[in-house]
């Protein structure tokens, strides 16, 4: 028995924060840890800690801002790779994907309906025109 090799038991699971980072739900592991500690990530319906071992078949509920993902762990990636590889490590439920798409569309429509503020302040000439229009 060698001391320095990887054990088969350890390759069958992975830390939750590391999996969320490798699956590209969060940009850094620290952001994943903060989300887990803040109760934004549940594993199999229970609140968990960042060091929780995730295995293939676990069901995760991830909330990030207004969006929520319901995914099933399909693979444990060895490294953080491109997004195309990251998508292979989980399968999203059809209901969750549909709900997230509806929310995205609703938020898009709300943004279009709200008045847009200009990116820059009006210059002196534009201020005078505004005052003239308003009647000050």
Image: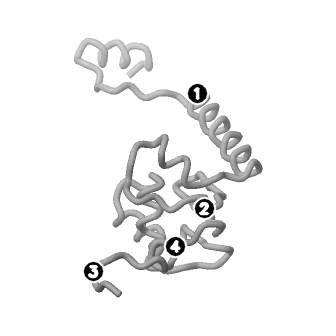
- Quote the CA–CA distance across marks 2 and 1: 36 Å
Tell me the number on the disc at residue 12: 4
Q: In the structure shown, which secondary structural element does the residue marked by tag 1 occupy?
A: helix
Q: Earlier in the sequence, mark 2 or mark 1?
A: 2
Q: Nearer the viewer, residue 4 or 29?
A: 4
Tell me the number on the disc at residue 4: 3
Q: Quadrant of residue 6?
A: bottom left
Q: State the count of labels.
A: 4
Marks 4, 1: nearer the viewer: 4
Q: Earlier in the sequence, mark 2 or mark 4?
A: 4
Q: Could you tell me residue 33's position as x and y percent?
A: 40, 70
- Quote the CA–CA distance across marks 1 and 3: 58 Å
Q: In the structure shown, which secondary structural element does the residue marked by tag 4 occupy?
A: loop
The C terminus: image quadrant: top left
Which residue has dot 2 on it? 73
- Quote the CA–CA distance across marks 4 and 1: 47 Å
Above or below: residue 52 compared with residue 98: below
Above or below: residue 69 compared with residue 100: below
């Amino acid at each position: 028995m060698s001391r320095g090799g990887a054990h088969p038991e350890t390759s069958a699971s992975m830390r939750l924060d590391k999996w969320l980072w490798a699956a590209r739900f969060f940009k850094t592991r620290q952001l994943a840890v903060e989300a887990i500690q803040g109760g934004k990530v549940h594993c199999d319906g229970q609140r968990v800690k960042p060091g929780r071992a995730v295995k293939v078949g676990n069901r995760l509920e991830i909330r990030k801002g207004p969006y929520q993902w319901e995914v099933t762990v399909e693979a444990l990636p060895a490294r953080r790779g491109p997004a195309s590889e990251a998508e292979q490590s989980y399968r999203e439920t059809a209901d969750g994907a549909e709900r997230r798409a509806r929310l995205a569309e609703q938020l898009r429509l709300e943004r279009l309906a709200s008045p847009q503020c200009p990116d820059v302040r009006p210059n002196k000439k534009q201020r005078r025109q505004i005052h003239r229009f308003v009647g000050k």
